[in-house]
Amino acid sequence: MQNNMKCIGLVALALSSNLVFADTLPALDARFETIQCALPCQRPVTRAWLMLREAGQVELRDVGASQSDLWQRHPNGDLEYLYLMHEQQRAINYNSVDMRMLGMPVGDSKWQALTQLVTKNELAQLEKKPGQPYQQMPTEIYSGKLNNVDTEITWIPALAIPLQVEYRHPTHHVTVKLVERYQGKLPVEKTTEKILQGYQHVDFADIGDMEHDKNALAWLAHAQGAPGVHAHAHDKHGEQQDHAH
């Protein structure tokens, strides 16, 4: 009996380890393009942006921008968001309570969308077939409807990221595609913990106390993309502009 229980324990431990490994994303530094076009498509609008992903952290930054979004996931599953202003060396910190107050999702699906562009639940709703290799890595093509929108996703399992996501709405198409995968020098400096330590941080909850501080208002003027910041100063909640997708 004891041997059986020991075997069961070992199997459970092995399964637990596999689950942890399955949820550990490989590091990825890449440039993406989001292309939107009203139908009939004549003037597509393209935005280039970077994803710098490592264990428990992802940084999203438009190409050429001096601001970026840094998301961190703590061991207990809580998300923390930092709006970074690199020229000013400032950071606005949002905890999960702040984000819920602003109506920003903070669950597993949000983390998956940030780090993988699509969620496991979305992939599960689509039909899968083999795709063409990308850099000698197998791909999978998922197609079907998500929220009644025709969708096709070319997925790279080894990188846990799509090569391309295409949403075909009746009036417009949106395509997100992986353009370049960096395996050496990056076009921008990644925001490391050491760099963060050199930035001046302010909690989002304290922004309201700064509306009469001229020095604070000077740098807050550069925080146009920070969720709720300028609405906070006018005693109302703002809406977050979703970075990626």
Image (tube, helix red, strand yellow):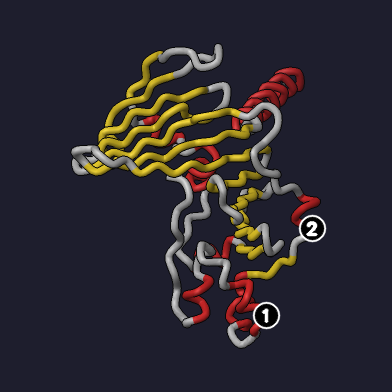
Find numbered disc 2 in the image and state the secondary structure of the residue it sits on. Answer: helix
Q: Which percent across, then down, holds residue 40?
A: 19, 38
Residue shown at the point (57%, 26%) measured from the top left:
159
Circles 2, 1 touching at the beta carbon (< 8 Å): no
Q: How would you rate the neighbour count of disc 2 (Cα within 10 Å): few for under 14, some for 14-19, many for 20 or more?
A: few
Determine the secondary structure under disc 1.
Answer: helix
Q: Position of residue 229 (x, y in %)?
A: 53, 71
Q: Give how far across and how far down residue 17 sits, in percent.
A: 68, 28
Decide: is 187 above or below 162. Answer: below
Would residue 83 appear left or right of 173 to someone viewing this image? right
* Residue 241 in the image: above or below residue 230: above
Residue lying at 55% horizontally and 12% vertically, measured from the top left? 136
Q: Name the quarter where the C terminus is drawn.
A: top left
Residue marked by disc 2? 197
Observer-nearest of 100 and 171: 171
In this figure, which residue is indicated by the disc labeled 1?
Answer: 215
Q: Amino acid at mark 2?
A: Gln
Q: Residue at x 71, y 19 (%)?
A: 7
Amino acid of disc 1: Asn
Count residues near mark 1 (Cα–Cα under 10 Å), then give few for <14, some for 14-19, many for 20+.
Answer: few
The CA span between labels 2 and 1 is 21 Å
Left or right relative to 135: residue 237: left
Viewer-nearest of discs 2 and 1 = 1
In the rendered view, does 160 fall on the left or right side of 195? left
- Residue 109 point in image, percent of width and height: 48, 45
- The extreme bottom residue here reads 212
Q: Which mark is residue 50?
A: none
Q: Could you tell which of marks 2 and 1 lies nearer the N-terminus?
A: 2
Residue at x 48% of width, y 13% of height: 133
